[in-house]
Amino acid sequence: MNAWQRRRAPEDVPTPIAVALSDYCRRAQAPASPKAVRDALSCLADAEDGGLKQLADGEPQAKPLGPFAVVEVLRGLSPEVAASRERAGEYRSIGASLPAFGEALPPAPQPAHSKTEPTSSEPAAPTPKRKKPRDPAAPKKLTKAEKLAERIQPRRRRPEDAVPPPPAPITLRGSAFLPKRSLPQPRGRFTTIDASRQSLDVLLKLTAKDVVVSVESQCGTRFGVWSALSTSYVGRKGQPLQLADVEAILERHGLLQALSRREAEGVLSHLTDQRGAVGKAASALGVSRAQFEELVAGLGLERQVKEIRQRFAREALAEGNLSARLELLGKGKYLVDLDIEDAFFAALRRDLERLTAEDRSEVVGVRLERAAKRHGLSVELLRRAASRLELT
């Protein structure tokens, strides 16, 4: 085995080279500590790092191979011989016996029969050290201050160093009409759960009753409670919180019946205030029309809701109530909501024809003005109704 001598300090070894050698030794079934890896790499020159990196990128040719064995393989030793020396433990004490960087190797002990042993009792004169000539092709070693300055100085980017943008995905010709695939949600251990949201089981505990009561008191319906809890909690298996889960939570804490009574009162009162219009009643209650209808069906209020709507529909279609019908002329959405649009315009036509049927000799506009003065109606509304019904 060749004599080992440090050619650079262990801390001067580039980190990527040390990581590559450590990974190579692990794959070669001889993992080593970071200190042993850097001690072995300190015996190589900077110019040899490229060869070591190329060797470490490949697969081990023999096993086991420690860091010092890899250095000898790089110097030309057979991988099988280096592996046999690794198994024999010949590389274990090399790191501890290496001198510090810049120190010479300790003199090897000479045998007793050596002819170089001095014959006199006086000690032999020390041999003067011969300074090794510096290789002009070798890179100049920098001091610590120069290395630190080089490390922290700003890097100037050159145009040739710019990373080109990734190429655009190639699409098959004539495949633009194909829809995107709707893949199923991941399940099991692949389920993605939002770390900022807690599980539904937290709200099912009795200790969470204060939280549920606070949310329920601020929301008028179960849909409002559902919307408020969905921002902080998820259902089972990481799925979004469902309305059935919210109802189970409210039932668990004894709040569902009281909330149902308040929901029933709110549905009927808002529907009455909006004169039977479901859309406006749902908006006033803070839910969508579909949720309003689901709430009516869940609370069993179909009969009461139907009676309220029929009462206001009869009021809009009642005979002798022409002034009220003229007020409803510009509320087309309300008529569509009550489902009386056709019947409303038919009744309005009959009323206008009855008003203008007294004197056929005059034009419709004059007859409308005379009828408005006689019955105390708005001339503008009568003209608008006649224009809408094409009676002019």
Image (tube, rainbow, N blue to C red):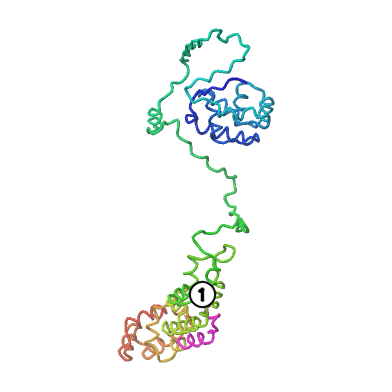
User: Quadrant of residue 154 in the image?
Assistant: top left
Compared across the picture, whether 376 is left or right of 286 comes to left
Image vertical order of residue 172 relative to residue 33, above or below: below
User: Quadrant of residue 169 in the image?
Assistant: top right
Residue extending furthest toward the front: 121
Mark 1 lies on residue? 291
Image vertical order of residue 373 relative to residue 72, above or below: below
Where in the figure is residue 57, as x and y percent of width and height?
60, 31
Q: Nearer the viewer, residue 198 or 149?
A: 149
Q: Neighbour class for label 1 at 10 Å: few (<14), some, many (≥20)?
A: few
Where in the figure is residue 255, as x and y percent of width and height?
51, 79
Placement of the N terminus among the 4 image quadrants: top right
The main secondary structure of the magenta stretch is helix
Q: Secondary structure at mark 1?
A: helix
Where in the figure is residue 387, as x and y percent of width and height?
38, 78
Is 298 covered by the magenta stretch?
Answer: yes
Residue segment shown in magenta: 290-312
For image coordinates 48% across by 39% down, the residue present is 165
For image coordinates 46% across by 86% down, the residue present is 313
Where in the figure is residue 268, as x and y percent of width and height?
46, 84
Q: Nearer the viewer, residue 143 or 177?
A: 143
Is 335 covered by the magenta stretch?
Answer: no
Report how many numbered discs are placed on residues in the image: 1
Placement of the C terminus among the 4 image quadrants: bottom left
Q: Amino acid at mark 1?
A: Gln
For image coordinates 51% across by 10% down, the residue present is 124
Q: Nearer the viewer, residue 328 or 26?
A: 26
